[in-house]
Amino acid sequence: MFKQSLISLSVSAVMLSTSAYAGELKGKVVDNNNLPVSNADVHLHGKSQTIKTDAEGNFTIAVDAASQLHVSKNNFIDQRLDVNPDSPFVTVTLTPSSVESIVVYASALHKSNMEMASPVTVVSGDTLKNSAKPTLGETLKGLPGVNASYFGPVSSSPIIRGLDGPRVKITQNGLDSSDASRVGPDHANTNDALGAEQIEILRGPATLLYGSGAIGGVVNVVDNRIPTDVIEAPQGAVNYSHDTNSNTNTYAVLFETGHEGFNFHFDGVKRQGDDYETPSFELPGDHDEHHEDEHGHDDHDHAHEGEEHEGEEEHAAEFAEKVDNTFIDSEVFNIGTSYVSDHITAGISYGRIETDYGIPAHSHDHGHDDHGHEDEDGHDHDDDHGEDDAHEHEGENHNVFARVKQDRWQALFNYALHNNWLESIQVRAGYTDYEHAEIEGGAIGTVFKNETTELRTNFEHRIGDWHGIFGYHYSDSDYEAQGAEAFTPATNTTTHAFYILEEREFGDFTLELGARVEDFELSSRITETHVGHDDDHDEHGEDDHDHDHAHEEAMVKTTQISDYTLEMTNVSASIGGVYNYAPGENVAISLSRSERAPLTAELLSNGLHIATSTYELGLGYEIEGTEIHFEPTDIEKETSTNLDISFRRFIGDFGYTVNVFHNDISNFYYQEKTNYFFTSEHGLEVADHEHEGARDVYQYVSKDAKLYGLEFDVHYQINDLTRIKLFGDHLRAKLDNGQNLPRIPSNKLGVNYAYENGPFKADMTITRYLEQDKVTSYETVTNGYTLVDASLSYDFAVKGIDMVGYMNLENLTDELGFVHSSFIKDQAPLPGRNLKLGIRAYF
């Protein structure tokens, strides 16, 4: 009923809008030398489409009411000017920028990355295509403030300022990716960088527009699956690349066409690769598995030299030069259509993902990884596993892999009104059906499903000197897991939210205000199993030699099922501003307070998570003796108070971006190691003795924490051909009691040297990942390492077709590096030396 009322309101606004006659605004875009700027984007606020300037820099655009004209082009500073239907011919002068200036889709207010009140980085164009990896985490991890969770290169999600999982929102064109990557680190996200036009990384809370799941930041993948501009002729691109390290072949294609405002889009990616190679590294000892911490390290000294165990030979170190079970076999395609006119943009799209990928270090409660077994091709899915039962008892790895399928529908409607105050109404809707099945021995084990419906309605307006949006956001997610590793129950999560974001210019200063009120509801059915004794049976008085057997028979299990609902109202607000104190220089300050409720894994986990070799418990459970009880009392919201200050210079030969932040979080949810072990035979036990196949028990807790640090990117244009850049980040994350938070990424420091001469481009990057010694009591120190990367590209034409050939040299020195933020740090080091060769054609 509410959604129907909202749609009726939108239609009424359209019907009652005040008409005004349309005028044609003509103009020209030039640079500082009065030379024409071609292919500049000219956009009128309120309309979804843009037009391009011609070879002489000229443009013509329809203007229906007083509005703001926005002119942008990469490597120039954006310009805005107020116009109306009677405006005369205008000349717009663009000033060159020393860094790439790109309009940020996720800003909602048509801001570029150099104008945002909060720090943002945009990766686009050939830079994005050439560096694209199978996962977003690996594609973006070199950026200041960004790292990767790294469950192998085929399952790696972004970490922003030490926050990941439920706190980093992964979106596609502003709508949630709706996969299961926030349930566990072994679950890959479903966004492919090769199909994107640009990827935007918003650091710090972005909860105002994107909800409580964005308390740490947003990674927004922007593509053109629903075309928003008029496509007048067929256009597209094809791409092929090969990685030598993992023998990965990647094919990508893009095709678009249109006629009289009707547009069509298709893109597809196929990627197939084997297990990746590494420098030689020592495998963790199999006999020590049940003592490993969450990174694969022992939490006590288990390597006593000369010590011999009764009936057991001394364990010899085992080394590997490859990480088994890290293959990928993926197919992705998106198809979409739209109609674009002067006032209306309407379209729909469908996307399909089918991906198989290996899950490294995946073992069972009763066994350990088998590092000696290897398929002939590294990942034969159809092998005969007739010996699976024997292997299971011998503790061998069965090459468990994930099979991901996703169907995704999206719709867009944008109406630009003939109205001086309400500029546009935009509705985006999405439906996603996601399934993640874990395959073992040819049989389906655990299956994770997530069915999501999402609606976002924006009203863009200009009231007096204020420009902004207000809107409504609805999301409904049905999640379920079935099988041996279903450590989280089925849940339904629904949110309704209203938000507003406003800005006003005061000369060289722009003030930005925002707020969001979100109604959050999580409902689930909880199953509790308790183990007890039959007291009557114990009275029969067995002989001593039969006591143990009788005791086992006296054990009884009781199961209790109860419905549970968590309801919270999350309120977020922000105030920020940007002061342009000199041409091409500004300082941005943003202060925000954001709230969020715990998600399914954080609140309701109760079971073995084999991929991380742990038994996980959520916030809602209490341990009493050796019994686990569901007692969700005093569940409090996680509240973040974040301050960001950014200094930017983006003009001339010398430029920089420096971000300083401080994030004070109350009731920070994180996993803490308990003093319990869990085995399927004995259940929960205090960790004072050993059992074969025992798993450490980790429980989500909430405590106050602080995260603070800085990110910087400084560049200097040495001459017309060469540029040097320094970049890095520093993060400190700890609880208020002084203890360190777990799995915080290592700090990094890097230098990049770039050379560009006409069609030829080359660069080299040296990145030093520093030692991470700020660890918890159940972690070990991660040594520092240095990665050396280089790339070459050359633009050329063949029979009128523009081509780009490129070569990436990754980890040139074949350095052995371990990722501290990874759950399987010791089992999966970073890939060794790799040569990537690629070619791309545009038509």
Image (spheres, rainbow, N blue to C red):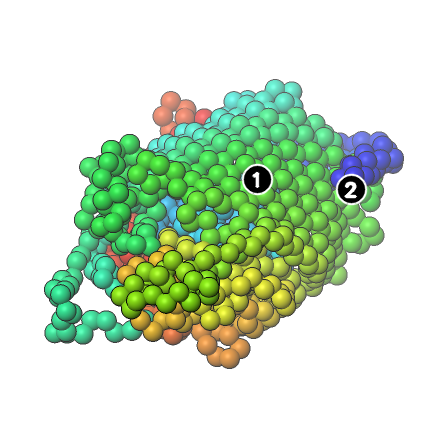
Amino acid residing under circle 1: Glu
Q: Earlier in the sequence, mark 2 or mark 1?
A: 2
Depth order, front residue of 96/564: 564
Q: Amino acid at mark 2?
A: Phe
List the residue tagged with mark 1: 451
Residue at horizontal 66 percent and vertical 65 percent from the top: 593
Q: Position of residue 148 (x, y in %)?
A: 42, 55
Instruction: Residue 683: tell me if it is visible.
Output: yes
Residue named by callout 2: 2
> Foreground: 566 or 772?
566
Label at residue 265: none
At a point 14% along the width and 64% down the height, the residue shown is 312
Query: Quick one: SS at disc 1?
Result: strand
Residue 630 shown left or right of residue 474 in the figure: left
Quadrant into which the C terminus falls: top left
Q: Which residue is most to the bottom?
A: 737
Q: Could you give the CA–CA distance between mark 2 and mark 1, rounded to whole angstroms? A: 21 Å
- 472 to the left or right of 294: right
